[in-house]
Amino acid sequence: MALYRLIYVSQAVAGISYSDLIDIMQKSEKNNMPVGITGMLSFGDSMFLQVLEGSRRTVSQTYNRILGDKRHVNAELIEFSEIEHRDFGLWSMKAVQIDNHPEIRNIILKYSSSSTFSPISMTGKQCLNFLREIMDLYQNK
Ligand SMILES: Cc1cc2nc3c(=O)[nH]c(=O)nc-3n(C[C@H](O)[C@H](O)[C@H](O)COP(=O)(O)O)c2cc1C
């Protein structure tokens, strides 16, 4: 069956905390695992950047559900494309907080004009490469 990747960016509403991120990750793991969705959710500087991988139908259904969540607004679709293989297949959803750790800020700076996390101003390729490098960082920890 064809595989798809969806990447979007959105703005967290005021007051979102680390415990919200944990709640989202737990719900995502529970829902994504049985339908074969994998991916990563990064959160920092009040922005979410998420990648979802799976069948076209399940990725679309999951994205539609996520769009209705009141914990974020102004979602913008960055990429929706057919892929040959998964990049984030290890995780039914890995949530990563983008903090001030130098290794993370260096990866942001590699793909942006400054070390502030602003996925809204990154290209689709930059977003994907950023997510891949963050994944490598966490996979090896
Ligand atoms: C930024 C963000 C990313 C989310 N990602 C997922 C996801 O990958 N999978 C998922 O099932 N829910 C995700 N959610 C949560 C959904 O919006 C929704 O709350 C949840 O799927 C409801 O699950 P339930 O019906 O089992 O309570 C996300 C929410 C936000 C705000």
Image: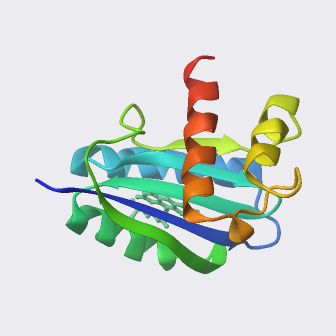
**82 w.r.t. 28: above or below:** below
* Residue at 31 percent of width and 71 percent of height: 60
In the image, 99: left or right of 94? Answer: right
Toward which corner of the image does residue 74 lie, by quadrant? Answer: bottom right
* Residue at 77 percent of width and 44 percent of height: 110
The picture places residue 2, in percent across and down from the top left corner, at 16, 56
In the image, 109: left or right of 120? Answer: right
Report the residue that reaches farthest toward the left: 1
Report the residue that reaches farthest toward the top: 141
Pick the residue in front: 75 or 66: 75
Pick the residue in front: 18 or 8: 8
Pick the residue in front: 109 or 56: 109
The picture places residue 31, in percent across and down from the top left corner, at 34, 52
Q: Name the image quarter holding the C terminus.
A: top right
* Residue at 24 percent of width and 46 percent of height: 34
The picture places residue 76, in percent across and down from the top left corner, at 57, 78
* Residue at 61 percent of width and 68 percent of height: 9
All told, the count of numbered labels is 0
Q: How is the image coloured?
A: rainbow
Toward which corner of the image does residue 13 lie, by quadrant? Answer: bottom right
**73 w.r.t. 125: above or below:** below
The picture places residue 136, in percent across and down from the top left corner, at 57, 28
